[in-house]
Amino acid sequence: MTDLSNIVEILAKQALGGQQQSQGGLGGGLGGILGSVLGGLGGGQQQSQQGGLGGVLGSVLGGLTGGQQQQAPQSSGFNGSSLLIAVVPLILSWIQQNGGLQGALAKLQGAGLGGQVQSWVDPSQGNSAVDAQQIQSLFGGQQIEQVAQQAQVPTNEVYGAISTVLPQIIDSLTPQGDSTDQNEANDDIQNVMNMVSGFLK
């Protein structure tokens, strides 16, 4: 098992501002917390209609799956922690599009981030920071624009969120460093993606 769901859970809790929603039997771990974030920030309406995190994630996932979802602009419910959780599906789908964990690591190393990547993968090292500019060439502008529009923030803030979350995600996917089971990591990515998209249907 990788630690991916733990990282997503921590980010989701931050997005909730530390308030655990008690209704709906949220003892279900990550699924419950994600549901709570998506439902809470969306005002509890159908996730495809409202703004907030549900709208952003819907827009990201809609864009990635080719679905055209019309989102109403939101005026509230968004903060820095919400933006961090909103870029999680973007990062996970980017890893999948690059052939899974191994391909994504190779792509990052090819972009001149070898030193940082090694620190994220090696459990004995702390995660080196990555500059938002260093990852701009890696992530598609259209998807970034979509998230920025939904969150009503400049695109550089979305890149900033990615540069914050990406090291945590790579770190969480490689608990055994270089000897981590890549297939297991890729399965965990798919599980989290399924969970997130489940809340947005």
Image (cartoon, grey):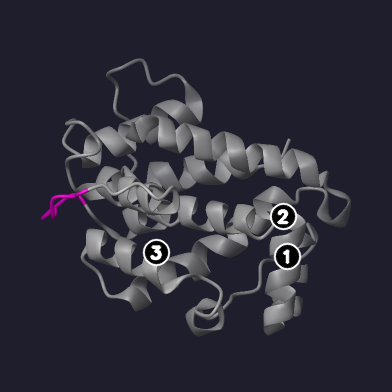
Helix, strand or loop: magenta stretch: loop
Helix, strand, or loop for circle 1?
A: helix
Q: Earlier in the sequence, mark 3 or mark 2?
A: 2
Q: Of the residues shown, which amino acid type is indicated by label 3? A: Gln
Front residue of 155/125: it is: 155
Is label 3 in contact with label 2 (beta carbons under 8 Å)? Answer: no
Disc 3 target residue: 143
The residue drawn where x is 51% and y is 34% is 194
Q: Mark 3 and mark 2: span between their CA atoms?
A: 20 Å
Q: Mark 1 and mark 2: span between their CA atoms?
A: 6 Å
Q: Which mark is residue 101?
A: 2
Question: Which corner quadrant holds the N terminus?
Answer: top right
* Residue range corresponding to the magenta coloring: 70-77
The image position of residue 30, as x and y in percent, is 49, 31
The image position of residue 80, as x and y in percent, is 32, 61
Look at discs 3 and 2 and give the one toward the viewer.
3
Of all residues shown, which one is farthest toward the left? 75
Q: Of the residues shown, which amino acid type is indicated by label 1? A: Leu
Residue 72, magenta (yes or no): yes
The image position of residue 184, as x and y in percent, is 76, 38
Q: Residues within 10 Å of mark 3 (few under 14, many from 20)?
A: some
Answer whether residue 47 is visible to the viewer in this image: yes
Disc 1 target residue: 105
The residue drawn where x is 82% and y is 55% is 177
Please state if 5 lies on the left or on the right of 27 as rendered.
right
The residue drawn where x is 89% and y is 51% is 179
